[in-house]
Image (cartoon, rainbow, N blue to C red):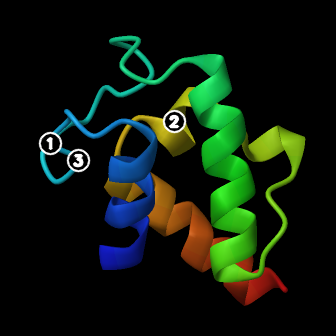
Amino acid sequence: MERLIEILEDIQPDINYEECTNLIDAHLLDSLSIISLVAEIEDEFDITVPAVEIIPANFNSAAAMYKMIKRLEEED
């Protein structure tokens, strides 16, 4: 989770990712940020994030992203 927070802070540093649960719904992350984020997640965690996983429910919070990452790691 710590590495995910670092990636998020590199992309958009002025958000409290530990507490924020509406990153997409509140438009705190835009589409370009999401594209960068997906690429970073794929590189860092050695997974592929399929297009069907790129939905607000998986990206509204760091916890949701981490849960998705762990699930995708298990599926690999």
Rate crowding at label 1 as few (under 14), some (14 to 19) or many (20 or more) other CA atoms within 10 Å. Answer: few
Q: At label 1, which amino acid type do we have? A: Asn
Return the disc, 1 or 2, that comes first in the chain's sequence.
Answer: 1
Rate crowding at label 2 as few (under 14), some (14 to 19) or many (20 or more) other CA atoms within 10 Å. Answer: some
Label 2: which secondary element: helix
Q: Nearer the viewer, mark 2 or mark 3?
A: 3
Residue 16 as seen in the image, left or right of residue 27:
left
Quarter of the rendering occupied by the N terminus? bottom left
Asked whether disc 1 touches disc 3, contact meaning CB atoms under 8 Å apart, the reply is yes
Rate crowding at label 3 as few (under 14), some (14 to 19) or many (20 or more) other CA atoms within 10 Å. Answer: many
Label 3: which secondary element: loop
Quarter of the rendering occupied by the C terminus? bottom right
Residue tagged 2? 57
Whether residue 22 is visible here, answered yes or no, is yes
Query: In the rendered view, would you say 22 is above or below 3?
Result: above
Q: Where on the picture, by quarter, is residue 47?
A: bottom right
Residue 1 as seen in the image, left or right of residue 35:
left
Query: In the rendered view, would you say 34 is above or below 48?
Result: above
Residue occupying image coordinates x 66% and y 42%: 36
Residue occupying image coordinates x 65% and y 60%: 40
Question: Residue 32's spot in the image, x, y percent?
Answer: 66, 24
Of the pair 7 and 71, the residue shown nearer to us: 7
Label 1: which secondary element: loop
Distance between the alpha carbons at the discs numbered 1 and 3: 4 Å
Residue occupying image coordinates x 46% and y 66%: 66
Residue tagged 1? 16
Q: At label 3, which amino acid type do we have? A: Tyr
Q: At label 2, which amino acid type do we have? A: Ala
Question: Residue 45's spot in the image, x, y percent?
Answer: 65, 80
Q: Where on the picture, by quarter, is residue 33?
A: top right
Of the pair 66 and 39, the residue shown nearer to us: 39
Residue tagged 3? 17
